[in-house]
Image (cartoon, rainbow, N blue to C red):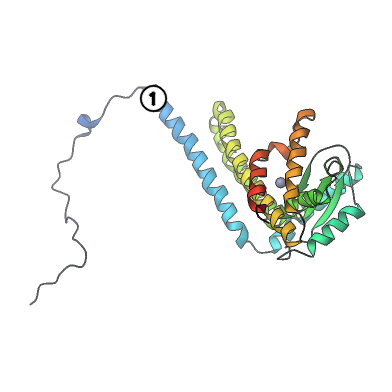
Amino acid sequence: MSERIPLTPQMPRNKTGYTAIPESINATPESALWMFTKYVLSIVFGVAILFWVLTEGVAYMVPYLPPESEQWLKPIGEEYIKQETKKNHISTDADYDALLADLKTHLPTPALVDIKVYKGLGDTINAYALPGGKIVLYDGLMRQLDDLDARRFVLAHEMGHVYHRHAIQAMGKSVIYATLLMPAAIAFPQLSGSITSLLNVSSMQHSQAKELEADRYAVMLLKASNYDAHAGVKVFQLLEKGTKNVKTPEFLRTHPPDAARIAQIEALTRGK
Ligand SMILES: [Zn+2]
């Protein structure tokens, strides 16, 4: 009988011959404080890693969610609009409707929801996209942008949040956030402050990535519509000025540094 040649190297067949080191020799004395610190650190890092994996998981899964999931969120945005309209904080505006209608005709892929735009009343320098495709552009911001393409950039940026389904990601994230944070904070009330700041840093970085993604979408949409995408730079110059007199608006707090956003627009519009 011919000898069979193994295709893969053989692993050692048994390890039972090894001499086990008795625990009494191996153990080093550890102080109770060090053991406690190790225990606490492993929990904090464990929670942070779990949070990161789950939120990245949410971002990864969003494109695979059925289109109807955007419709499920619609009532949340609608309710917000209803309340804000009642309080006279927002209204509809024919100029904003016209800006949107024009950009919509150049969308490379149709949005999953019907996008609607509203005017935020007052001096607030802000703009945001709500769940279900509702966009609010504050008059305080739009009024200060004389360049029509800069106004279009703000709207296209918010349309980018809708297209990339950032609202559903943010909601999934806050659910995970609450689920993870609550038991940790109950078990270690003295640590809840540090856990919160750890998670906040992570959620901030995530939203900065989203802002840059929405900016890229705005550049793409303005280019596709034959408008000047470089006008987006003017928005950030205005925002930079705005932070000097106004208390940091929400639009800025979660946004990446203006310099990084300007650099991205410059890079994407070079040699246009
Ligand atoms: Zn944004």
Q: Which residue is mark 1?
A: 34
- Judge left or right: residue 2 versus residue 100: left
User: Where in the figure is residue 78, as x and y percent of width and height?
Assistant: 82, 53
- How packed is label 1: few (under 14 Cα within 10 Å), some, or many (20 or more)? few
Rendered position, 251 above or below 4: above
Q: Position of residue 22 (x, y in %)?
A: 19, 34
Using residue 97 as the reference point, say whether residue 54 is left or right of it.
Answer: left
Q: Is residue 130 left or right of residue 24?
A: right
Q: Locate residue 249, reporting x and y percent.
A: 76, 35
When the figure is inspected, residue 212 is found, relative to residue 112, above or below; the finding is above
The front one of 224 and 76 is 224
Give the structural element (helix, strand or loop) at label 1. helix
Q: Which image quarter: residue 206?
A: top right
Give the residue at x 85% y 45%: 146
Residue 131 appearing in the image: no
Instruction: Give the quarter of the image for residue 104.
Output: bottom right
Residue 192, x across and y down, in percent: 58, 30
